[in-house]
Image: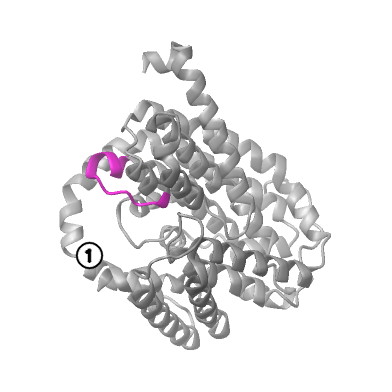
Amino acid sequence: MVEFVVGPSRTLPILGWLFAGVVLGTLSGLTPGLHANNFALLLAGFAPSIPAPPLFVGVAMLAAGVVHTFLDIVPALALGVPDPAMAPTALPGHRLVLQGRGREALRISAVGSLLAVGFAIPLAVPITLGMGRVYPYVIENLTLVLGGICVLLVVTERMMRARLGALLTVSASGALGVFTLDIPATGVLPAGNMLAPLFAGLFGAPILIEAFGGSGVPEQDDPRLTISRTFLLTVGLLGTLSGAIVGYLPGISSAIAAAGALVVLPYYGPRAFVVASSGVSTANTVFALFALVSLGHPRTGVLVALDQTQVPHDLPVLLSTVAIAAAIGFILVLALGDRYLAVVGSLDNAVLSIAVLGLLCVLVFAFTGPVGVGVFAVSTLVGLLPARFGARRMTCMGVLLVPLAL
């Protein structure tokens, strides 16, 4: 650690690679359908030919992953905004955009992510020690745990029609995962797997299709936060603790964990979900890093790439990377988010939706080839099911839950 702080020969190159990772994370975070995992796996593929120590490459991967968790809220809010008549079934963030509170949503998301880093780093050691004791028992009963989550996704829907839709979606997405997850990717870029077309189809394309007839981003109000500091701290802490679950257990998504966190709170509306889900996503990076170091199990694409590149488990350097990248990510959301919303709001929504769908097809083909495009098309059809029944979109996570449970 002393060498990292005062040794220019080591500190300056690390900072250089960190800022390179920030650039990659900014590109992936602001580009719909592109994830930091893709850049990380690309770097892992080219790592043997990169003239730099594995630790430096790992710093770039980790910084990209952290910045991505801050910035991915920006296109998520700006793209796929439905018609106001569909507001009751819209995603929580889109409901805020339709109310003219998109700029506030950007800021509470950034605060939620920053709080998650602040909470996660000191909590990571005791939680890791506790998880080290219970982890073997959880893995022994993983089928029951994941099966129970599938059941909860169905029975916690409020209406019978929505429960039927949730059951169909969990079953259909689960079957899709069983039959496609192990198909080898044949794209031109050496960083693909079938998660790319599956997630783009289940969660990306349906939102764009459903919003095709909408008017896009309406005029947004001032960015003033309308929630209290206590609210932010409470929900941010719950999101952080839920991020620990995502970081250690396979098959649990950030959306599922965020929804689970809010079960223990009174209903605070879409703002609570935005804060919690942002916190889960960012805290997951910290806890997954500790899970890799302590248990040897990488839980995110970025950490899989770190593991493949044989990055040394230098926690002082890696945690410093997380902290610095988080601070930069927070600033980038404030600097770029409002402009992104304004630019997207000035464009024709139908043309924009078609363009983004085309971009998703190009990315899927680049990473997974023609087979991936077919998987993308089928998963898009499955991803349209929840909205038809008024069910939550997170029921599409059956694509991972069912195969892992089996």
Quarter of the picture containing the C terminus is bottom left
Quarter of the image holding residue 358? bottom right
The x and y percentages for residue 43 are 46, 43
Q: Residues within 10 Å of mark 1 (few under 14, many from 20)?
A: some
Q: Is residue 339 left or right of residue 385?
A: right
The x and y percentages for residue 249 are 30, 56
Q: Which residue is mark 1?
A: 142
Q: What residue appears at the point 34 percent right and 52 percent down from the top-left corner?
A: 299
Disc 1 is placed on an element classified as helix
Quarter of the image holding residue 362? bottom right
Q: Amino acid at mark 1?
A: Leu
Residues drawn in magenta: 290-301
Q: Is residue 175 left or right of residue 143?
A: right
Q: Is residue 148 visible?
A: no
Q: Is residue 279 visible?
A: yes
The x and y percentages for residue 170 are 40, 78
**Residue placed most toward the observer, 260 or 134:** 134
Q: What residue appears at the point 50 percent right and 68 percent down from the top-left corner?
A: 369
- Name the colouring of the figure: one colour
**Residue placed most toward the observer, 227 or 218:** 218
